[in-house]
Image (cartoon, rainbow, N blue to C red):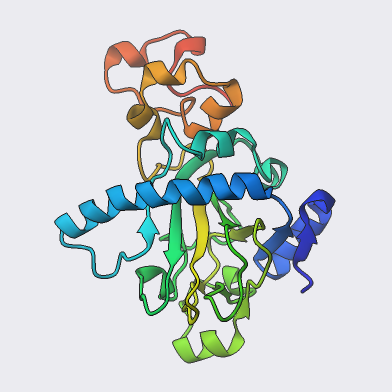
Amino acid sequence: MKNKFKYSDADLAVFDQVMDEYGWIIYEDALDDAFIDEIRDSLVPAYDVRRKIQIANGIGDNMNGTLHHLVERERFSLKFLERKYCADQMTHFLKGNYIINSLGAVINLKDEKPYVQNIHRDIRSFTGDFKVMIQMMITLDEFTAENGSTFFLSGSHKKDDKPEADFFYENADRANTKKGSIILFDSNLWHAAGKNYTDATRRTLTMAFTKPFFKQQLDYPRFLGYEFGEGLSDDLRQILGYKSRVPENLNEYYQPVEKRMYQPGQG
């Protein structure tokens, strides 16, 4: 595939060219096996918590294998974000600082039909050349056509209209790649998770990063706690959105620049 590269060989000129033509790019050998195992192990208790809530709220039928909002004080998420995988590419794509919009996972099991298998894009409104969001997937297992590798309709990030299903599946490419790969793609790109026909589990992290002014799916600074954020690194505070908060009262609004909820350099 012309859009698959080694993570160590990342080049922004190549990134630009591939993202413009295909709308997605793969970087293999990005995460080490030990970290992958740590992440996979943490998904088990995390899924149990979320699955109970999905079922209790009556939305369990098409949510099988989906985990949302894994940004937590414990487990792997802060360690993952601190490592700033593909930070140069995302900063380049969004033309400035970025924050996490969502961080979740998909556990693709045989015979399951979660909503992510529907043809969709990950941003509600088509933004064309104005890039406000970029998606990242981390393959926690090898991606194959048999176990449900993602379908990407290459070039569809330049078109607003949703493709017909027959056209999509006849023309879409598959993201077949190694465990530990990073897949970056334009949020305007039409795609769909594949069906898993094997007895093995196919797991992936799914996340979105945006320009800082774009509203997060969950208010991560408030969820984690403002005091907790004071002990984080400057880079992590940026990614989590601590520097692009919205004041809730006049006292929070009328502050010196260095204490403002929405800091300079956030777009």
Q: Quadrant of residue 266?
A: top right
Q: Position of residue 190 (x, y in %)?
A: 52, 72
Q: Position of residue 80 (x, y in %)?
A: 57, 39
Which residue is nearer to you in this view: 166 or 200? 200
Q: Residue at x 64, y 73 (%)?
A: 155
Q: Quadrant of residue 233?
A: top right
Which residue is nearer to you in this view: 239 or 197? 197
Q: Residue at x 50, y 12 (%)?
A: 257
In the picture provided, is 263 more to the left or to the right than 178?
Answer: left
Q: Residue at x 41, y 60 (%)?
A: 124
Residue 234 visible in rendering? yes
Residue 93 visible in rendering? no
Image quarter where the N terminus lies is: bottom right
Q: Residue at x 75, y 64 (%)?
A: 18
Seen in the picture, residue 143 relative to 259 is either above or below; the reply is: below
Seen in the picture, residue 107 relative to 235 is either above or below; the reply is: below
